[in-house]
Image: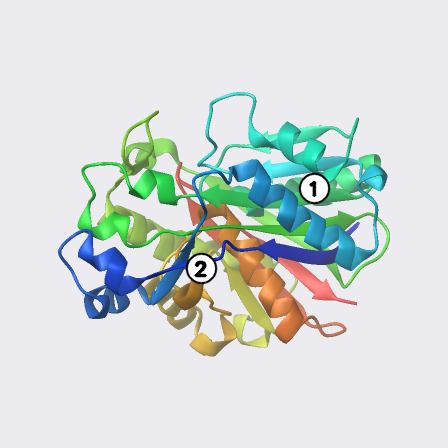
């Protein structure tokens, strides 16, 4: 048994409009909005690293939870945009948090990393104690690489989100999770060292629109829950059109899928936890009501987590 204790987040101060982003690839704000639902995104400064953003989001989460870094059993950092291959940002993040001696683990996964981290933490918390799961991405340095593709460069932003998983009490109990991977499509979304991001957009949207609803249904059916009975769906903020498509497939109102992609763009593995943090502060868990977390990313990796308010 494991619980969601608290969320945290951090977003850079620089706001990049879709008019500016569209100009990089010969498009305008209207086109960007139509294909993605994004009006603006945040970009970190040249000096800000993935570990800086991760530590700020983690500190926000711990402060809200009233917990000291030294009380943690582990720090996990999910990121597909770290500045180097190794060591990953987790060890630096733990140091910047003041969690000296606390084991730190990297999850080098794009988009689905924080979801996999939550699932793993829910299983390890009973053994290790409180686990801080962080998703942090600096996609701005990647989308700036030439050649900039029209359907890629306008989508991404920077930021970090965090979630504290505890073994004993919190706002919601993590009930179960369903995870999946299919390497058949591993070449359809890739980031080689120093190269621009390559994405087969049609394949990504097609597979995501199939696999996310299937994973959500799978975890709900195990507990006799129908999608319309779910209080809220907290999903990786990849594209507003995809969020709407998944909602339609599940037969639930699109408003049930919390969305902040309009403000922040696609922040890869950070997006799920940034969205969860905002949802928790604006609306939040209700006793006994189910909430679903879901994500899809490079690999392809995907999954869904069922939580219930306490």
Mark found first going from the N terminus, 2 or 1: 1
**Which residue position is annotated with label 2?**
213
Residues 168 and 227: in front is 168
Number of marks: 2
Is 252 placed above or below 110 here?
below
Residue 274 got which mark?
A: none
Instruction: Between residue 96 and residue 160, name the one nearer to us.
Output: 96
Q: Which residue is mark 1?
A: 121
| Residue 119: quadrant of the picture | top right
Residue depicted at 61% across the width and 55% down the height: 9
Please report the residue visible at 53 percent of the width from the left and 70 percent of the height from the top: 227
Residue 213 located left or right of residue 144: right
Other residues around mark 2 within 10 Å, as few (<14) / some (14–19) / many (≥20): many
Left/right of residue 209 with respect to residue 145 in the rendered view? right
Above or below, 137 against 104 in this view is below
Q: In the rendered view, tell whether residue 221 sits above or below residue 112.
A: below
Cα separation, mark 2 vs mark 1, equals: 23 Å
Position in image of residue 84 (x %, y %): 47, 25
Residue at image position (36%, 64%) is 40
Image location (x, y in percent) of residue 235: 50, 59
Badge nearest the viewer, 2 or 1: 1
- Residue 97: x and y in percent read 72, 39
**Quadrant hosting residue 219:** bottom right
Instruction: Using a 10 Å C-alpha cutoff, classify the residue at mark 1 as few (fewer than 14 neighbours), some (14 to 19) or many (20 or more).
Output: many
Q: Which element is circle 1 on?
A: helix
Report which quarter residue 193 is drawn in.
top left
> For the residue labelled by badge 2, is the local secondary structure a helix, a strand or a loop?
helix
> How far from the left and from the top, in percent, is residue 25?
17, 52
Residue in the image at 16% along x and 60% along y: 27
């Amino acid at each position: 048994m494991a619980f969601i204790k608290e969320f945290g987040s951090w977003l850079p101060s620089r706001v990049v409009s879709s008019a500016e982003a569209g100009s990089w690839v010969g498009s305008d704000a209207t086109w960007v909005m139509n294909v993605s639902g994004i009006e603006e995104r945040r970009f970190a400064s040249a000096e800000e690293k993935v570990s800086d953003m991760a530590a700020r989001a983690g500190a926000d989460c711990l402060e809200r939870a009233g917990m000291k870094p030294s009380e943690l059993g582990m720090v996990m950092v999910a990121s597909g945009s770290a500045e180097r291959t190794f060591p990953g940002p987790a060890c630096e993040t733990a140091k910047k948090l003041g969690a000296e001696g606390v084991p730190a683990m990297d999850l080098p996964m794009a988009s689905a990393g924080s979801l996999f981290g939550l699932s793993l933490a829910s299983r390890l918390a009973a053994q290790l104690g409180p686990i801080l799961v962080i998703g942090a991405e600096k996609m701005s340095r990647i989308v700036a690489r030439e050649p900039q593709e029209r359907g890629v460069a306008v989508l991404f932003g920077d930021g970090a989100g965090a979630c504290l998983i505890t073994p004993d009490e919190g706002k919601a109990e993590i009930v179960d999770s369903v995870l999946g991977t299919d390497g058949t499509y591993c070449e359809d979304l890739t980031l080689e060292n120093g190269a621009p991001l390559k994405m087969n957009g049609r394949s990504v949207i097609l597979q995501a629109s199939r696999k996310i609803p299937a994973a959500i249904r799978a975890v709900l059916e195990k507990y006799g829950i129908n999608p319309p009975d779910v209080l809220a769906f907290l999903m990786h903020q990849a594209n507003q059109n995809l969020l709407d498509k998944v909602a339609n497939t599940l037969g639930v109102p699109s408003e049930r899928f919390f969305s902040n992609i309009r403000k922040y763009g696609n922040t890869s593995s950070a997006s799920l936890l940034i969205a969860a943090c905002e949802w928790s502060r604006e609306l939040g868990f209700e006793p006994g009501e189910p909430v679903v977390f879901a994500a899809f990313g490079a690999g392809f990796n995907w999954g869904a987590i069922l939580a219930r308010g306490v």
